[in-house]
Amino acid sequence: MSGMALDAVGQSVPLTERPAWQALAAHQRRIGTLHLRQLFADDPLRGERLVAEGLDLYLDYSKNRVTDETMLLLQQLARDCGVAERIAAMFDGQPINTTEQRAALHVALRAPAGTRIVTEGADVVPQVQAVLAQMAAFAEAVRCGDWRGHDGREIKNIVNIGIGGSDLGPVMTYEALRHYSRRELHSGSISNVVGADFAEVTRALDPGETLFIVCSKSFKTQETLTNAQAARAWCLAHFKDEAAIKRHFVAVSSNTDGVAGFGIDPANMFVFWDWVGGRYSTDSAIGLSTMLAIGEASFRAMLAGFHAMDQHFRQAPPQHNLPLLMALLAVWNTNFLGIESVAVLPYAHYLKRFPAYLQQLTMESNGKHVTRAGAPVGVATAPICWGEPGTNGQHSFYQLLHQGTRPVACDFIAFCQPLAPLGRQQDMLLANLLAQTEALAFGSAGMAGQQDDVAQPWRTCAGNRPTNTILAPRLTPHTLGQLIALYEHSVFVQGVIWDIDSFDQWGVELGKVLAQRIIAELAPEHAQELAHDSSTNALIRRYRQQRLA
Ligand code: F6P
């Protein structure tokens, strides 16, 4: 593969001026109005050809508004943008997170023991394996009742305290793999800085049977530390003995001093490293609550699924490479068809938190406006990502998917074998998924024996709405690992094409700084004049008046 296109002075050529981009733009002008009805009519085997299979995942991308030529041109764009080189750089531990000068080495978290992955002169795999062993020993001790609470009782409740990647990942993986979990261990999570979240999660819990896992990479996140302090106070109100903390609190962090400062014994700390981004951390020690729920063997099976997808991503040729294909289709839809949002629609109830997880993965990674060099990107970047499980969504927002004025690209995800079979429910579920993808592609006039009634345009569904369908035999820990890694790598490739740093998140900092300032101003004793804009000043004054009413 050729490297990134450079001009005569060695500067990166703007994306839209690259020949591959311009070829795609010209191609779009030629085929942009083609309807999926036509594309399928012209090629009876389209639905069997425009598919790719890797590991347990079958990707049908035939219902995208693409031709064979589109896919070839997109692959040329990937070559032109140096995707292969950037993939190699990521796996080699190079500091591809350029604005923070560090590697993005989540692939090391699932590398088998004995693999060698070096960053900053150190092989990180032995460290990863050591933490995994520590997690496994701890999880086993809790699960078999060897780890007991302060008054000698067994732990029955696990509560994860974290936010962002330190919450969305573990909550999503726990929900996804709940079928494989030990039911005697109750799992909960607290993320939001609102007393109601804390109160509702803890109200039925017995402090003597509850273990808190405080998850924070930085151990500086205001919401998490506030909730952890509340949990500490809740625990001490029951035990009235500081010694209880070390039996009821463990921490997952890269900040040992912060953990010790909080009062958690560093012996009860599980580390991860600054080369693991928060939204890429669910397979690190941040997944401790998941391992407690499903056990070491299932957790390792999930890691093996991640790793298998890593290998697929590195080795599969472009036309079969699932993350690459997903990324290229996303770029096509976003930049050449002008589609601004992606709905992730799992027809699998256990994946109900997957869309929320992907929101952070995709939007915090690629919601960026400048290139790695700081120049304006010049094209649209991350689409807005959202979604809900089917069929629930069908009775809510699918109206807009079918007839709204702004098209939405959709990823449908389903498994053939149900984990909880019940009558014909799985057939019903899958029939709905297939019906939706068919209706979105072909519209009302595409249905056999139907013609649009021009006198009743409100009944017309235009179709031509692009969808991917991802089908797998069964939701297992291994398949889940594959699925998460599929999206991680797809997001990465999109970021490479847009030439942005997918591993930083500077945009969230400003709000954090302002909140720190405002929180002082909300205190009753605050006497200084407010110096915000007139809207913020008025809202602060109104809040102050009404908060005690
Ligand atoms: O504010 C955004 C963010 O930094 C996310 O990137 C991260 O996942 C989350 O906050 C939580 O951070 P931490 O794990 O350091 O508490």
Image (cartoon, rainbow, N blue to C red):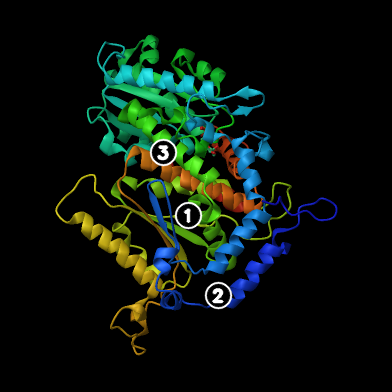
Q: Amino acid at mark 1?
A: Cys
Spot the residue most to the bottom.
455
Q: CA distance from mark 3 to mark 2?
A: 37 Å
Secondary element at tag 1: strand
Residue 315 appears in the rendering: yes
Circle 2 — which element? Answer: loop
Q: Is residue 154 above or below residue 313?
A: above
Secondary structure category for the residue under label 3: helix
Instruction: Depth check: give the residue in front, 342 or 228.
Output: 342
Residue annotated with mark 2: 32
Residue 16, horizontal then vertical, whole percent? 70, 63
Identify whether 57 is placed above or below 19: above
Q: Are marks 1 and 2 in contact (CB under 8 Å)?
A: no
The residue depicted at 34 percent of the width and 48 percent of the height is 352
Q: Earlier in the sequence, mark 1 or mark 3?
A: 3
The crowd level at tag 3 (other Cα within 10 Å; few <14, some 14-19, many 20+) is many
